[in-house]
Amino acid sequence: MGAWLLQHRRSLLFLLFVLVVAGLLSATKMPVALFPNVVFPRIVVSADAGNMPIPQTEIAVTRPLEQALRAVPGVQHIRATTARGATEVSVQFAWGSNMTEALLQAESAVNKVLPTLPPGTRFRARRMDPTVFPVLGLSLTSDRLDAVALRRYAEYDLRPLLLAIHGVAQVDVQGGAREEYQVVVDPMRLQSYGLTLAAVEKALRNGNIITAVGRLQRHYRLYQILSESPLKNIHDIKHIVLKTGTAGVVDLADVAQIRVGTAPRWTTVTANGKNAVLVNIKQQMGANTVAIDHAIRSLLRQDASRIPPGVKLSVWYDQSQLITAAAASVRDAIFIGAALAALVLLVFLRNLRLTFIVALVLPSVLLASVLVLYVLHQSFNIMTLGGMAAAVGLVVDDAVVMLEHIMRRLTQKPDELAPFESEPSTILRSALEMSKPLAGSSAATIIIFLPLAFLSGVTGAFFQALAISIAAALLVSFLVAYLAVPLLADLFLRPQDAEKAEHEGRFLSWFSAWYGHHLEKLLQRPWILLGIVLGFLLVGGWSYTQVGSGFMPAMDEGGFVLDYTAASGTSLVETDRLLDQVQQILAKNRDVASYSRRTGLQLGGGITEANTGDFFIRLKTRRQHSIWQVMQSVRQQIHDQVPGLRLETGQLMEDLIGDLTAVPQPIEIKMFGANEQTLQKLARQVAAEIGQVPGVVEVFNGITIAGDAVDIHVDPVKAALAGMTPAEVTSQLQSLMEGRVVSRIPHGQEMIGVRIRAPRAQWDAIRRLRQLPIIAPDGHYLALGQVAEIRRQSGQAELHSENLKPMIAVTARIEGRAMSKVMGEVKGRLAHLQLPQGVYLQYGGLYREQQQSMRELALVLLAAILLVTVLLLFLYERFTVVLSILATSLLALGSVFVGLWLTGTERNITAMIGMTMIVGIVTETAIFFFAEARSAERHELVRAGKARLRPVLMTAIIAILALLPLALGLGAGAQMQAPLAIAIISGLLAEIPLVLLVMPALYAWLERLVQKGPVPMQH
């Protein structure tokens, strides 16, 4: 093998250079995103059936849709919400499902039952993926332009430019106003001319005609024949002829007031307290978020002169800033960790040539790993970059172990070495001696990631990317350490380098002697070993009880969403008044950079009631308080100063993941039962109980009351006596009140609607509704109260169901405490509730996801231990060695709980993956130890320990320092990986005494138990 390496030295080094260059090119082409490209297995079907009461909507719309969608192949879970005339059904499939096919099947299922639904029912089915939320949000405000002109510029000038940018999927415009022509009919004038409302609508439609009536061939040419009578402006509308006779011509202007107005608006959009138009840019799946942001900003700079005077264009949300900050924090962690590792290497070996080799190896391995990620269609995101940062210490370890072994072999006396032909062969043969231990140790750290492929849910989707990046780096690191490092050492090292390193490394001799002395004592006194093991177990076990568990690590995104709901039925005007007070609170907060507000709308673009909406609040980069302190402060101020608003706070990406997985809240207590009133009463009790638990905030009892309604019940008999049907009366009401767009006129790039309606003064109160004039077919007028009963209806509660069972869910968030601690108290309080007959509780939300993920990760840890056991048996074929290594690894796991407890870190998903990695890391170090030990003889174990003392200290310290920037959580990206880094650092700190002291003593003791004399090791 040594001869082969020498023969192909140039080829191998050039191959490494090619891989590095290819990795560098791949890095420029890889998409950049915040999270991995995940296909969420959820479809939402929304149906609109008009203004039908909630109980009828549930029977006529929701249940048929639920039953149809439940029959779609692959459906695991279905959940429905019924509001007034509207239904939303959430359909959950298994992770890994083909969601394109699932969407088609869901649409097909709905289309089959559509004929059985109420007439006019419309539905929309959509996949839930990250593209439903914007990656960039722009706000337009102006003191000069009105709401119509501002929206017109955003929709017809700015939007087409943005859609032309590569990677942009959709551009939504919110806010502003749409221009329209309003025909306000005077019923008394209509009656005086003997006209009906239907006649006016017909005249408007018939007076705006452009249609092809035929074709004509003449003189070798083909002509299209058009018949047209288009309306072009308000003057044309006024002079539409309604009637002719002896008295003359009756124009539309004779019976109606025609004016330019705006379409009815039941939403409000503001930016920093001013009325605004918001432009939300959504990206295509897999697009490069950072590249899109750069392209848009470049476009806006180039077209700055085309922005109308007086228009201020601002950015209210920019996901690329979070991505860039997260990537920068992880990048800095890699650079700082690498620099600290090089410093440790220089301190221990005092050799610039060795440091230079490691400095070459680290970027080479990372760039070659990028090539692997590119081939596997990964992206640069917070998980893959975090994985590479976590792997820096392990990557350096492989090179350090190989170089240290080569240096040690070079310093041995000639009679201690096998005969070599030349000095280069000494280096290469020394490297070959490490081939088996290096392969075994690398396999130990790589195979532990195999079980992660079986993780399900959002945990598996996210952390598989982390596992892939670490495993790729470790695999490339092994190949480079095995093939390239010996060649680089042969190329750069000289015999005097080894002698110099040995001479200048004598400061470790006293520590080596001290270590050998104490290991000797430990080998002679097994009872000391028992005390050490019991100490590790007791401290680790106690720390485990003190560490709370959580789900995903918290990350400062630099901004948060504030959802609000006013009392049911609150008007848009009153809601605006309340929110003006909220805006004043935000404007006075020194940590707030900007904010945008939607009322009657959602950040994702959906329409809600006029009393609900959200703020997005962007914080300053340099601020005095953390985002969690700001959220708590803002929530408390609003609670004190603006009573009557129900609030929910959360960071955008946190909310996004919750919405995509249909588990938006950490705490969710679901109550199932047949009686809606019983469930509502129980929900209020549950909400009151959990609201008393410390750390539980933003409790919502799950009861959403729709606003009051005015019910106009048309009496069919009375209507028939007037010569009308209930449908004809309803049609007139639609035209007179909200109005009906009966025609459209082209104007520039848009079509302006022509709306016909009655004067608002005739129906702005319930008592006036009774006097609203209705025109009978024969032309006579009658009051609405003559054919209809008008009554006020109290608001009805929205209905919820899960898997076709009636349900109400009480939700809440957790603040300042671990999820496990809070949920333990919540369960304790609810255990004393007397549940009505037929009612039962279930726990959902992020807590349910966390419990499932923790169970799966426990199995992953067990599978990793079993895989390591199989590997060790293949390497050594002795259970005493295997048990010694496994016991050492498990004791190191106990130290992880100590580290989590000391740092106040939750035992979350990231920390659990760090624990799994510790098993492989400790096993790797143990394999190198047993590569030195030839038997279980006391003197042989002491010799092996002294030989491994320096590399164990070096690799552990290097790995700890490389992970330190991540553990400190400096930056959003580092915060996500901080628990993983803390877990690994804690295990590495325990690894040093465990591998160097406890493991040799445990191995010697086990050997004495199974046989009388020591048995040579099999290498």
Image (cartoon, rainbow, N blue to C red):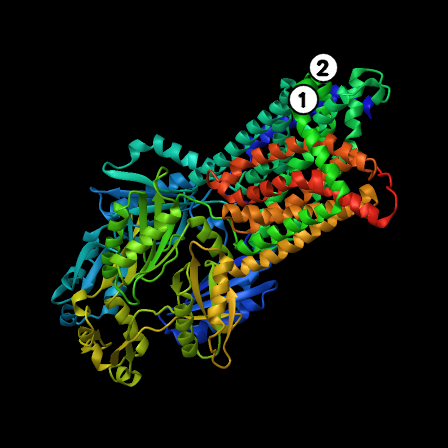
Residue at left 30%, top 34%? 306
The residue that label 1 is drawn on is 506
Q: Which of the labelled discs sits on residue 217, or is there none?
A: none
Give the total number of marks visible in the rendering. Answer: 2
Can you see residue 416? yes
Please tell me which of labels 2 and 1 falls first in the chain: 2
Residues marked 2 and 1 touching at CB (< 8 Å): no
Which amino acid type corresponds to the residue marked 1 in the rendered image?
Arg
Q: Circle 1 — which element?
A: helix
Residue at left 81%, top 44%? 874
Left/right of residue 89 with respect to residue 428 in the rendered view: left
Q: Circle 2 — which element?
A: loop
The picture places residue 638, in percent across and down from the top left corner, at 29, 56
Nearest to viewer (mark 2 / mark 1): 1
The picture places residue 897, in percent across and down from the top left corner, at 58, 49
Left/right of residue 130 with respect to residue 187 in the rendered view: right
| Relative vertical location of residue 632 with respect to residue 166 in this rendering, above or below | below
Quadrant in the rendering for residue 728? bottom left
Relative to the observer, which residue lies in front, 388 or 56? 388
The residue that label 2 is drawn on is 494
| Relative vertical location of residue 526 with respect to residue 787 in this rendering, above or below | above
Q: Quadrant of the C terminus?
A: top right
Left/right of residue 130 with respect to residue 626 in the rendered view: right
The picture places residue 571, in percent across and down from the top left corner, at 25, 63
Gap in Å between the C-alphas at discs 2 and 1?
A: 20 Å
Left/right of residue 159 with respect to residue 585 in the rendered view: right
Residue at left 69%, top 46%? 889
Relative to the observer, which residue lies in front, 78 or 64? 78
Which amino acid type corresponds to the residue marked 2 in the rendered image?
Arg
Q: Quadrant of the N terminus?
A: top right
Q: Residue furthest left?
A: 247
